[in-house]
Image (tube, rainbow, N blue to C red):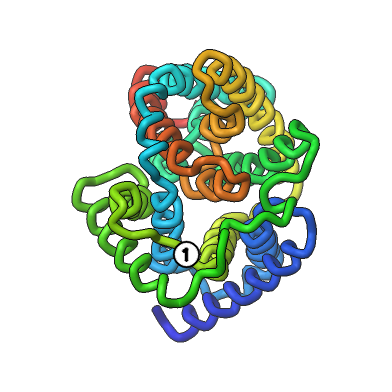
Amino acid sequence: MTPRMLAATLFLTLLSAGGGFVASLTPMPLPFMLGALLTSGAVAMFQAHRLPDGYAYPMPIRMFFMAIIGVMVGAQVTSEILQQIPALGISIIALTLFTGLAHAANYQIFRRIGGYDRSTAFFSGTPGGLMESLAMGEEAGANLQVLTMLQFMRIILVISLLPLGLSIWYGVPLGSASGISTEVTPVGLDAVPLALAVGVAGTILGRWIRLPAGQLTGPLLAAAIVSGTGLAPLPIPQWLINSAQVVIGASLGLRFAGMRGKSMLRATWLSFLSVAAMLGLGLALALLVAHVTGVKFDILLISYAPGGVTEMALVALSLNANPALVTLHHIYRIFLTVIGMGVAARWMGLRGRG
């Protein structure tokens, strides 16, 4: 990384942290993530010329903090959670149904209502596998800027609307809006080295066995083993959790570079329609599965919400839902989406625009 790139990263991170802090003074859910995202997005859309040519947020930094989140999520695994796994069969079946129906509905929204070409509508409509959707969509001739916008709007709208919707559903503020912290008791610096060591070991493990979203799920698995077997507790200081949200928000916001005007407004309202359809479907399935299995409704709803592994794990933590079970569902959703996307794209003959 050149000195100019390093300076840009430092400035953008500090600026995004300021945005996160300001957001934390409001009822905004996930304030440090969304505040950072809005700040970084504003820079990308209106001040991108001030960044170095070809600038992208350094992936090693993002991966480091994703590993921290993985450790934080994995540390939630307990013997009580493990005892619930056999009861998840019905929920997984419902999630399989959700994935197929959500993709089909999104394709119709983006193709019939939005008027996008087949490739752009198809790959924009996937309820997961963001990077895979971008890569395969580009090969199939999709409009990459529209595809990027729609995919990131999916994540942003879900992590924004879901906590708000649950707050309205229960009639009380939930998650970040309620002022609840993920840190039950103050955690000192002495807890950080073990968490970092588990994160590094988990990242290596995730790459070695090629886990989906390995930079998150590897540390999650390592932390789950350490915590679930009772080897050691893995508390993480709140300032480190907030820092992770800032970095993820800052890196997501940069994706809005060059996206504004009528095309952005069009993609935005179509994204609202798409997310509303997916959340409505997820709501119906969550209510049904909760009634049949007894699993908590809010855990199921977050598990079916297509907001990305890292982001929805943070939402689960914010809402005091069980993030380990939520992450298990999202890993499966992404895996199923990527495989189904490849098979369906070949079946539909998506090799170019049209």
Compared with residue 89, is residue 85 higher up or lower down, i.e. above or below?
Answer: below
Give the secondary structure at mark 1.
loop
x%, y% of residue 275? 65, 32
Residue hosting label 1: 236
Q: Residue 26 versus residue 3: which sits nearer the camera?
A: 26
Q: Is residue 43 left or right of residue 13?
A: right
Compared with residue 124, is residue 238 higher up or lower down, i.e. above or below?
Answer: below
- Which residue is found at the position 61% from the left and 50% from the top? 318
The N terminus appears in which quarter of the rendering?
Answer: bottom left
Compared with residue 202, is residue 268 higher up or lower down, i.e. above or below?
Answer: above
x%, y% of residue 15? 65, 74
- Which residue is found at the position 58% from the left and 20% from the top? 105
x%, y% of residue 241? 53, 63
Query: Does residue 133 show up?
Result: no
Compared with residue 216, is residue 61 higher up or lower down, i.e. above or below?
Answer: below
Q: Residue 71 versus residue 139: which sits nearer the camera?
A: 71
Q: What residue type is labelled 1?
A: Ile
Quadrant of residue 43 within the rendered picture: bottom right
